[in-house]
């Protein structure tokens, strides 16, 4: 006998921030691009498990931001918006925006979960202590989150540009950093407790996701990422899909990939409550 997934809505929160990007602006346009792809008539509302997930996404709009580099008020506004959704006992998928948004998101999750595991897909470790004089850079969210004790475990998949500083940071914090060549070594059964999933679209190979600011060849495929999502034991309490830059996209290809991940993450959240 199979159990139907819960039909309680999942909140969808847009975070239009790109001022903390180190190379190109454009990610602030990401939330609306993913929304457009989610509701495009080129696809439908169902995920791969044939659950009509899009109607179960409660779009709560965008966080109001100044979109200023290194802005602590912007970070605080993100934390407060996420805190409000968690207070309503909602699971949450955030759509960015650059990857700097993940640190203020995790600050809110820390208040609810003291045993959080973060699974992070990216080309980059994003653990710089400080990049270009901006500690809130999109290259630093996991350094800040680890310093603040936002998680008990961080597993990074798809990393292929780790500097020696990043390797040192991983050793310092006990981070599991897995390259694309070794992604099959990832053992989801080793995870326990609540899981937060952070997906930087440049973790994929540029052939799958050209609409990102940092093209780093040799990345994961869409199917590899979907298989990782499918294998997570849950409960998956939150997720973000970040770094879509529509100004670099081709025929909305990466927006559709981002929307696909939102649907599959929603389905995984519903199935593993």
Image (spheres, grey):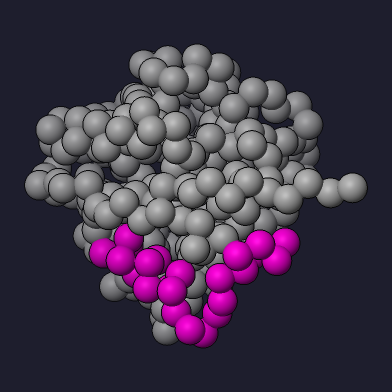
Observer-nearest of 126 and 59 = 59
Q: Quadrant of residue 147?
A: top left
Magenta span of residues:
29-52
Looking at the image, which residue is at 42% across and 15% down? 149
User: On the rendered image, what quadrant is the C terminus found in?
Assistant: top right
- Image height check: is 195 above or below 206? above
Residue in the image at 57% along x and 60% along y: 53
Image point 43% across, 74% down: which residue? 39
Q: Residue 250's x, y, as percent?
A: 41, 80
Residue 40 magenta-highlighted: yes
Image point 42% across, 84% down: which residue? 251
Compare residues 67 and 62 and report the one nearer the observer.
Answer: 62
Is the residue 218 above or below the residue 125 in the image? Answer: below
On screen, 49 above or below 255? above
Q: Residue furthest right?
A: 1
Q: In the image, residue 79 lies at what x, y percent? A: 27, 31
State yes or no: residue 88 in magenta. Answer: no
């Amino acid at each position: 006998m199979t159990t139907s997934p819960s039909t309680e809505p999942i909140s969808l929160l847009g975070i239009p921030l790109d001022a903390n990007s180190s190379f190109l602006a454009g990610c602030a346009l990401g939330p609306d691009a993913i929304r457009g792809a989610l509701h495009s008539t080129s696809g439908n509302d169902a995920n791969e498990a044939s659950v009509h997930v899009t109607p179960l996404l409660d779009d709560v709009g965008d966080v109001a931001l100044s979109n200023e580099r290194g802005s602590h008020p912007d970070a605080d506004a993100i934390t407060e918006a996420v805190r409000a959704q968690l207070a309503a006992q909602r699971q949450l998928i955030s759509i960015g925006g650059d990857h700097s948004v993940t640190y203020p998101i995790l600050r809110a999750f820390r208040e609810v979960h003291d045993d959080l595991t973060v699974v992070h897909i990216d080309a980059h470790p994003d653990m710089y202590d400080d990049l270009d004089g901006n500690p809130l850079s999109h290259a630093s969210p996991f350094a800040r989150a680890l310093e603040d004790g936002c998680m008990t475990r961080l597993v990074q998949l798809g990393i292929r540009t780790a500097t020696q500083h990043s390797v040192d940071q991983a050793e310092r914090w006990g981070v599991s950093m897995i390259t694309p060549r070794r992604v099959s070594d990832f053992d989801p059964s080793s995870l326990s407790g609540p899981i937060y999933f952070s997906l930087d679209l440049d973790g994929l190979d540029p052939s799958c996701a050209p609409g990102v600011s940092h093209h780093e060849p040799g990345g994961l495929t869409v199917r590899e990422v979907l298989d990782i999502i499918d294998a997570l034991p849950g409960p998956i309490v939150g997720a973000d899909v970040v770094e879509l830059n529509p100004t670099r996209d081709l025929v909305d290809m990466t927006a559709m990939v981002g929307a696909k991940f939102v649907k599959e993450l929603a389905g995984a959240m519903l199935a593993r409550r």
